[in-house]
Image (cartoon, rainbow, N blue to C red):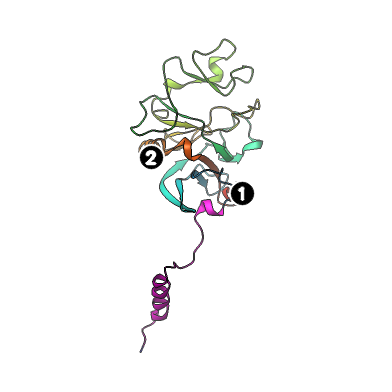
Amino acid sequence: MRRPGAAVLLASVSLLTLGLAPSGPPPLPGRMTDTGGGTQLITAQATRTSSTTGTVTWWDRRDGRWVKAGSAAARFGAKGLVEGGARRQGTNTTPTGLYGLPYAFGIEAAPDGTKAPYRRVHRNSWWCQDNDSRAYNRWTEPRPADCRAAESEHLVSYATQYAHALVVGFNYERPVRGRGAGIFLHVNGRGATAGCVSVPADAMRRIVRWADPARGPHIAIGTAGGATAITRY
C-alpha cells in the first residue's frame, strides 16, 4: 500500500529528474514593475504606511533570475512611509519609490572591497536642507553662507548613523523645495528615523561593499500592498 504523500513525493522527484523545480511565486524583484534596469537592487519593504520597521533585502540578477544576496531588519521614519511625490520636508516620513544610489559616504573608512564612489566625512561636512539655499539637498564643504546650520545636518555629529551610508536619490537630481533632503540608507540609531532607512551596522557595511555602480544598483522603498506597494515600482 502506498504511503500518504507518496504521489506528491514521486511527482517532485520526477520534476527534479527532468531538471525542473516545483513552481512557486517569483522573488520580490520579479514581481515589480520596474527595478531600475540594473542587475543589483535593494528592496526596503514595510507592512503598511504606518509601519516604522520592515526588511531590507539586497538582490543580484544572475542568469536572468533575481537571487537574494542578503537581508536585514530595517527601520523607517517615525511617522511611517508616504508616496515620494507627495512627501513634505520635516514630516519624519520615509519616501516610497524607486531611486538611484549616487554614492556612499561615511565617518569611517570605506569597507575593504568597496566599489562605489565613497566620500569620507570631515568636520566641515554638511548636508544642506535649507530650502532657501542654492545648495539645497547637497553635501557641502564648508557650509555656504546661504545655508543655515539650523536647517542642515552636520554629518560628523552622527557618529553611529553615518559610520557608513548610501545616498538615496530621492529629490536629488532636480530638487523640489519643501519635498525633503538628506534621505539615506544608514546605520541604525536609537529608534525610528527622521525619514531615512536604517539597518544594523554589519548589514550596512555589507551593503556598501556589495554595491557596484557598474551593475546599476537602485533602491525600491514601499509597502506590502496598497497605493505604496513596492511591486508598483
Residue lying farthest to the top in this orientation = 145
Q: Which of the two residues, 33 or 197, is positioned nearer the viewer here?
A: 33
Label ID, residue 154 = none
Q: Which of the two residues, 4 or 190, is positioned nearer the viewer here?
A: 4
Residue 162: horizontal and vertical position, in percent? 42, 28
Q: Which of the two residues, 61 or 149, is positioned nearer the viewer here?
A: 61
* Image quadrant where one finds the N terminus: bottom left
SS for dot 2: helix
Residue lying farthest to the bottom in this orientation = 1
Compared with 116, 25 (above or below) is: below
Say which amino acid is labelled 1.
Arg
**What residue is at 53 percent from the left and 54 percent from the top?**
30
SS for dot 1: helix
CB contact under 8 Å: marks 1 and 2: no
- Give the crowd class for mark 1: few <14, some 14-19, many >=20 residues within 10 Å: some
Q: Which of the two residues, 50 or 128, is positioned nearer the viewer here?
A: 128
Residue 92: horizontal and vertical position, in percent? 56, 33
Count every numbered label the image shows and give the total.
2
Compared with 228, 197 (above or below) is: above
Q: Earlier in the sequence, mark 1 or mark 2?
A: 2
Residue 32: horizontal and vertical position, in percent? 57, 51
Magenta stretch encompasses residue 132: no
Compared with 68, 100 (above or below) is: above
Magenta stretch encompasses residue 26: yes
Label ID, residue 232 = 1
Q: Is residue 133 left or right of residue 6?
A: right
Range of magenta residues: 2-31
Q: Which residue is mark 2?
A: 203
Q: CA distance from mark 1 to mark 2?
A: 26 Å
Say which amino acid is labelled 2.
Ala
Compared with 36, 15 (above or below) is: below
